[in-house]
Each structure stands twice: as structure tokens, then as C-alpha cells.
Amino acid sequence: MTSLKASFDPRNNSIGFLRWLMAFMVIFSHAGPLAGFYGGHDLGTQWSDEQSLGGVAVAGFFFLSGFLITKSKMGRASTPRYFWRRIMRIFPAWFLVLIVTAFTLAPIAYIRESGSIAGFWDATENSPLTYFSNNMWLPLNQHTIADMGTTIPFYTIHGGFEWNGSAWTLAFEFGCYIMVAILGVVGALTNRLLGGIIATGIILLAMMQWFGIGNLSALTPAFGDFRVLLLYAPFAFGILFALFGEKIPIDNRLALACIVIAGYTYARGGWLVAGQYAFCYVLIWFAIKATKLKNWDKHGDFSYGIYIIAWPLMQFSAYFGLQDAGWLVYHLVIVAGCHAYAYLSWHLIERPALQLKDWTPKWLTALLHRTAKPRGVAMDWLDPNHAAAKAARPALPPAPDALTRPVAEVAPVGSAAMTSASSRGVGA
């Protein structure tokens, strides 16, 4: 029996496949309310009173993100660099999907529904011209465009308008990134006991929320939104796996037991209290064991692009009655469309943006160089472990051409360019 720390290889795992698979779990789940399948309800709610199949996938996303993002922050990257990399992973593709939705999908769908474009561009409420600006910072403040959509299943079944109903999780994802950064700044990632107490506390608060124990919103208004603890709990579980990897066994028998627990609690109750954590263990076990799938995303990490375009494409297709062609045809077309979009998004937007993750403006490079000594003194004072960690680092020889290349062109040691976990495993 080996531990997670000894078994996990950031370059030899199937996390890319798992993220791709879970993105399609979300699609299949949302085909209920968006296309009218499964009685108009999310797939999975027919068997579980606690979570849909899409909700299961989102919990898995947040767990893997908590594990990978925490490990990334535990590296040598500074907090500003950490945030820059997270921004480069999330926002460029998000900006693209907002533009495509407002200026391509929505006007075509409007013409299909109304017979002309009249009233679309000059809509006084929910204008296409404000859809980008209202949603660009991740919280969804504008859900529809030109009040369209009264003829499609999502409105006729649920009475709602929504151009991207999956994207609400992105704001919570970035909130988790901020939490990890704070844990790093206060030393809770080097003092594992402190970090473990905080992560465990989040999980316990989520359990209290589910059981209805106490008034959690009295602790902070943020807990007034049940989704905060719902999503932060699996993310915190991922933090624990990153902090205490040497104490977590990777064992086939334990994985089998967790599969049974996850399946039983999903169908019979207890998923949010215990089952989702058993499911998360199965994910990391599978990621380590199924190494034959390690090259699943060799042509690109499409999971994020698939996740953020799926709902808009499904909404768009509903205007043309694709759901009337039947379950199989519907899903084949949606899967193909999501892949085509995600391929272009990755190669034209996401990958070029990630290539900037280690970029630093020349003026900032010069400023950092001039302030290196006072910043080091300040960090030694703020974090007692900082000086010891700095002294323990082995001296690294310069790259062969480091003396002849400009400073800004030399990739920082320990950056995401030199490890695949932080660049391949991050997303929705």
C-alpha cells in the first residue's frame, strides 16, 4: 500500500480524462430542463433527493481543483504570480464565451423566435450590449438577453430565462482560489495543522448546514447563500489531500468501499454528508491508477471550454427544436458542437493565454529586483517559517543561456511552465 504523496505523478495521471468526463456529466444532467428529457428535471434527481448528476460532477471538479490549486500554491510561486496564473486560466475563455453568446448565438436565436432582429440590439432591458459587462467578473448579474426564450423548454417547464446556467460556479471557484491564497499568506499551507483545522472546519460547517444546525449566516453573511459551503466543502477536502498526502493510502480495497458508500448514499441518503467525499477519494484513486488515460488531453484541455459553452449551445439548439430529433441525435450534436468550440477555444484563446502565465512587465521586473531585500525582511517578520524555507532551498545553477538572455525571458524556477499540474488541472 502506497500513499497519495508517493503515488501521484503530476505528469502521469488521468485527471484530464476525469475532468472531460465530468463536463459531460453536467451536459447530460442539464438536458432535462433545457431539452425536456427526464421529465424536464436534471438527470440524477430521479434517484437522489440531494444532488443531480451534474451536481456530483461539480463536486468532483471542486475537489480536484482544491487538490491541484493547493499543491500549486505550496510551490515557489509568489501570491501575485499565483493570481496571475489563475486569471489567465479563467478569464480569457470566459470573455470569449460571453462575446460568442451575446453577438452570435443570441441574435440568431432571436431572429428564429421573433422572425426579425427588430428590438434586439436596442432592447431597453437585458441588452446584448450589457451582457458582457454585467457578467465579465464571473458573478452572473444578467441572465438573459432581450428577454427572449419564452418558446423553449427551459421557460415552458421552469418559467426561467438563462443563457448560461452552468457558469454560476465560476465565481465560487475563484472565491476558493482567493481562500487558498489567504491560507498561503497566513502560513496555513506550511503549518499543515492550521491548514487542516481550517479545511476540516469548512467541511463540518457544510455538514451543519445540511442538518440545519445553528444559524451559520450569523458567522458571516456569505453563509446565507447555501452554495458557498456546498462547493467549498469538496474544495476543502481537496486541500486536505494536498496537505496530508503522505497519510492518505491509495488502496484498491478502500476505493471499492468508497464506490459502495458513494452509490448507497446517493440513492438512499447521506450523499452530502459522506457520499461525496467517498466519491472524491475514488476520483483521486482512479486518476493515479488509470495511467493509460494520461494522454487523453494531449490535443488540449477541453474540459473548461466544454463546461462553459455547453449550456449556451443547448439553449441555442432548443430554438431550432433539436430536442425533437430524439435523445440520441440531440446528445450527439451537442457533444460534437461542444468539442468543436472547446478545440478552437483552447488553441486560439486558452493556450495562448496560459503561455503568458510567467510573463512579467519589464518595469515590474525592475521594481521587484530593487525591492527584493526589504520584501524578504518583511516576509521573514510576517512568517517565521519563511526564512527557514528559503535557507533550505538548494542553490540552483543558472540555465546555460541565462547569462545572455534578458531577465524577463528566463522562466522562474518552480513555475507552472515547469510542472504540468497547475496548468492542466485548473478550470471550472
Image: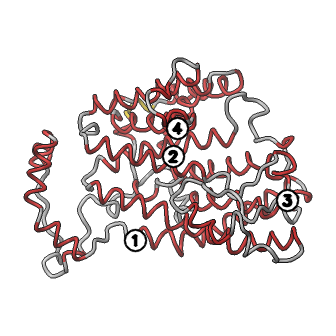
Secondary element under disc 2, as helix, strand or loop, is helix
Work out whether mark 1 precedes mark 4 in sequence or the reverse, and give the earlier one.
Answer: 4
In the drawing, what numbered circle is on residue 329?
3
Q: Which mark is residue 228?
A: 4
Q: Tell me the mark number nearer the camera, choosing from 3 and 1.
A: 1
Q: Residue at x 86, y 77 (%)?
A: 116
User: Which tag, 3 or 1, sits closer to the chain's start?
Assistant: 3
Tell us which disc is closer to us: 4 or 3: 4
Q: Amino acid at mark 2?
A: Phe
Q: Secondary structure at mark 3?
A: helix
Q: In the picture, which quadrant includes the N terminus?
A: top left
Image coords of residue 364 (percent x, y): 22, 71
Residue picked out by circle 2: 172
Which callout, 2 or 3, points at the residue further toward the start of the chain? 2
Do the CB atoms of the residues marked 4 and 2 lie less than 8 Å apart?
yes
Which three-letter amino acid code belongs to the residue tagged 4?
Val
Tell me what residue is drawn at x 80 percent, y 41 percent.
41
> Picture coordinates of residue 90 (x, y %)?
49, 60
What residue does disc 1 label?
A: 355
Identify the element where label 4 is drawn.
Answer: helix
Amino acid type for the residue under numbered disc 1: Gln
Q: How far apart, in angstroms, are the residues tagged by discs 1 and 2?
A: 25 Å
